[in-house]
Image (cartoon, grey):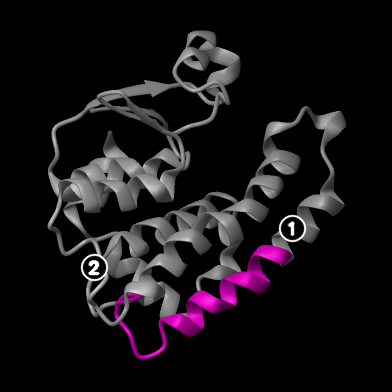
Amino acid sequence: MKLYHCKGARSLRALWALEEMALPYELVVMQFPPRAFHKEYKEINPLGTVPALVDGDLVMTESAAICQYLAEKYGPTPLGVDKGEKDHGLYLNWLHRSDATLTFPQTLVLRYTLLEPEERRQPQVAADYRQWFLARWRSVEAGLQGREYLCADRFTMADIAVGYSLYLARTLAIDEAFTPNVLKWWERITARDAYRRAVDR
């Protein structure tokens, strides 16, 4: 397998998952955004986004889907939650919420505070989407009430996927996301050796 990655980008989800599962892979680290600095990358992923995971003839570009794929294809692993388990639906919901609901508004904050040239930055848009993210992030604080992890009473791909949203919140200085339950969970999941290896890479 080969993973195309940019430091701090959503590809961290896939990298963390690969490290947790101790799967063999080749890592290609690119400057962000790759569509600007690595034109040849569009031959792998025409969207120019990261991640891209190449596994034989398969190319995947959705970070949460890659986490699910790795657990299902290369398991069994406790990182996945099987169909027969009580929390299977909850697990899938967190995986999909991680990007569609949580990371999406953060990308607009990122764009309009850091990525655009100074004259194109939109403080009001960034502020609005910051609040949008925080309103939706409350579901994580609530979901962790009485739990150490998001589902299945163990660390899973859902924690990796949602954990990246908090990683990005920290990058964007959205400190209000670090509510009491979330902070304990964050300290727990980022103490894992695989997380540290992924960030170091």
The residue to which callout 1 is attached is 129
Based on the picture, tell me whether residue 70 belongs to the magenta stretch.
Answer: no
The residue shown at (85%, 32%) is 120
Of mark 1 and mark 2, the one earlier in the sequence is 2
- Badge 2 density bin: few <14, some 14–19, many ≥20, Cα 10 Å: some
Q: Is residue 5 left or right of residue 168?
A: left
- Report the front residue among 195 and 150: 150
Name the secondary structure under disc 2: loop
Estimate the x, y position of residue 91 in percent, counting from the top left.
36, 70
Q: CA distance from mark 1 to mark 2?
A: 34 Å
Residue 87, placed above or below residue 96 = below
Which image quadrant for residue 154? bottom left
Q: Quadrant of the N terminus?
A: top left
Residue 179 visible: no
| Amino acid type, callout 1 | Tyr
Residue 115, placed above or below residue 65 = above
Q: Is residue 67 left or right of residue 6?
A: left
Which image quadrant for residue 182? bottom left
Q: Quadrant of the C terminus?
A: top left
The residue shown at (12%, 57%) is 76
Estimate the x, y position of residue 3 in percent, counting from the top left.
32, 29
The residue to which callout 2 is attached is 82
| Amino acid type, callout 2 | Asp
Residue 127, placed above or below residue 32 = below
The residue shown at (46%, 69%) is 93
Q: Is residue 191 left or right of residue 147?
A: left
The residue shown at (32%, 78%) is 87
Based on the picture, tell me whether residue 150 belongs to the magenta stretch.
Answer: yes
**Which region is colored magenta?**
132-151
Estimate the x, y position of residue 160 in percent, counting from the top left.
34, 57
- Report the front residue among 38 and 7: 38
Name the secondary structure under disc 1: helix
